[in-house]
Image: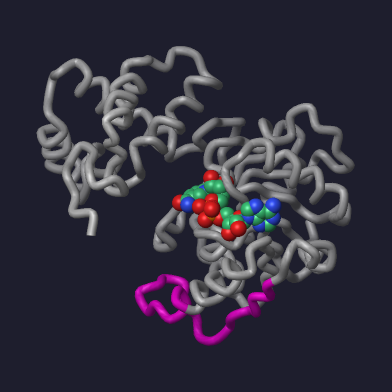
Amino acid sequence: MDKAGDAVTILGAGTQGTRLAYMWTSQGQPVYLIDKDEKQLEKAKKGVETLKSNTQSPWATSGKWGEVITSSPDGLSEAASKSWMLLECLPESLKLKRTIVKELDELAGAETIIASNSSSYTIEEILENQSLKQPDRFSSLHCYWPPETSAIEVMGSSKTRPEIISLLMEETKKHGFSPFHVRKNSTGYLYNRIWAAIKREALLTLAEGVATPQELDAIFKDVLKTPKGPCEQMDVVGLDVVRDIEQHYADVRTGIPEEPRQYLQKMIDQGKLGVKSGSGFYEYDRK
Ligand SMILES: NC(=O)c1ccc[n+]([C@@H]2O[C@H](COP(=O)([O-])OP(=O)(O)OC[C@H]3O[C@@H](n4cnc5c(N)ncnc54)[C@H](O)[C@@H]3O)[C@@H](O)[C@H]2O)c1
C-alpha cells in the first residue's frame, strides 16, 4: 500500500501528542500538530525540542528531523490533505473520540489512515454504529509513556484492511517504535491487560487482609527485579484513574470481581489518591 502523503497529522498536543510529534518527525518527515489551545501548542513545540536534545534517547538521529508545524483546528483540512495518517490524541472521552473520527472521515482522502491513541476505547468501540464514508481505514495505535518505552500496539477494527495494519507495523518500526499487532479487538490491548490483572489481584490480596502494601511491593520487586511494586505504581498513576480503568474493564467484560474497586473506592473516599494527593498506599511530601 502506498502512503497518501508525506506528513502525519496529530490532533491533540498534550503529553502523547508531544511525544508522538517527536517520534514521527525523527526520520525527516513533517508533522502537523493541531490543538485548540495555543499555549499547549507552544509547550508541545518546546517539549519536542527537549526530547530531541535528550542524548539518552534511543531515537536521537543526526539532524534528520522533520518540521513540527503547529496549528489550530482551522488548519486541519489542509494538514489532512498532506498526510498519510491522521492520529487523534485527544482527551479520553468516548463522545469526543466518536465525534472526531467522524469529522476526520469526512475530510480525509480515501487512502488516508485514521488512527486513535486511546488507552481505554478500542477503535471498534469508537466506530460502533457510526455511519462512515470509509470504514475500512481505521486503527487503534496505542503507545506508552515515558518516551523511552518504544512499545506501540496496532489494532484494527473488524473492518480494517490488512494492508493498513502492515503499513502501520512497517512505518512505526521505521520511526523507532517496537510495534505489536493485537490480533483481535481487545480492551486494554496487550500489556495493559497483564498490568490490569496484576493490579486487580494485588488489590484483592489487600482487601482480604493477606498482606500489607509494603509486603506486596517487596515480594513483587524481589521476584521480578523491577524498581516499583504494584502499590507504588498505582500511587504514581493515581488511585482514581486506576479505579476508572478497572471500572471500564468491568463495564465491557464479565467476571471482573468487585472487591478491588470497592477497596479503591474506600481509599478515594478518604482523599487518598496516591502521589498527587500526598497520600495513597504510601505517604508523600506534597512539595
Ligand atoms: N498520557 C499517557 O500516558 C497516555 C498513554 C497512552 C495513551 N494515552 C491516550 O492518549 C490520548 C491523549 O492523552 P494525553 O495524556 O496526551 O492527554 P492530554 O490531556 O495531555 O492532551 C490532550 C490535548 O487535546 C487538546 N484538545 C482537547 N480537545 C480538543 C479539540 N476538540 N480539538 C483540538 N485539541 C483538543 C487539549 O488542549 C490537550 O492539549 C488519550 O486518549 C489517552 O488515553 C495517554
Q: Nearer the viewer, residue 94 or 28?
A: 94
Residue displayed at 35% across by 42% down: 238
Residue 187 in the image, given as x and y percentages of width and height: 54, 31
Let me know if residue 230 is in the magenta part. Answer: no
Q: Is residue 186 above or below residue 208?
A: below
Dominant SS type (magenta): loop
Image quadrant in which the N terminus is located: bottom right
Q: Is residue 6 above or below residue 147?
A: below
Q: Is residue 238 above or below residue 128?
A: below
Q: Residue 277's quadrant in the figure? A: top left
Residue displayed at 51% across by 64% down: 19
Q: Is residue 113 left or right of residue 184?
A: right
Residue 165 in the image, given as x and y percentages of width and height: 67, 47
Residue 103 in the image, given as x and y percentages of width and height: 81, 48
Is residue 172 visible from the viewing direction of this image?
Answer: no
Image quadrant in which the C terminus is located: bottom left
Residue displayed at 49% across by 14% down: 254
Q: Nearer the viewer, residue 218 or 28?
A: 218
Residue displayed at 57% across by 66% down: 40
Q: Is residue 162 left or right of residue 40?
A: right
In the displayed orientation, state which residue is furthest to the bottom. 63
Q: Is residue 20 left or right of residue 214?
A: right
Is residue 234 visible from the viewing direction of this image?
Answer: yes
**Magenta region:** 50-70
Q: Is residue 130 above or below residue 67?
A: above
Residue 15 in the image, given as x and y percentages of width and height: 50, 59
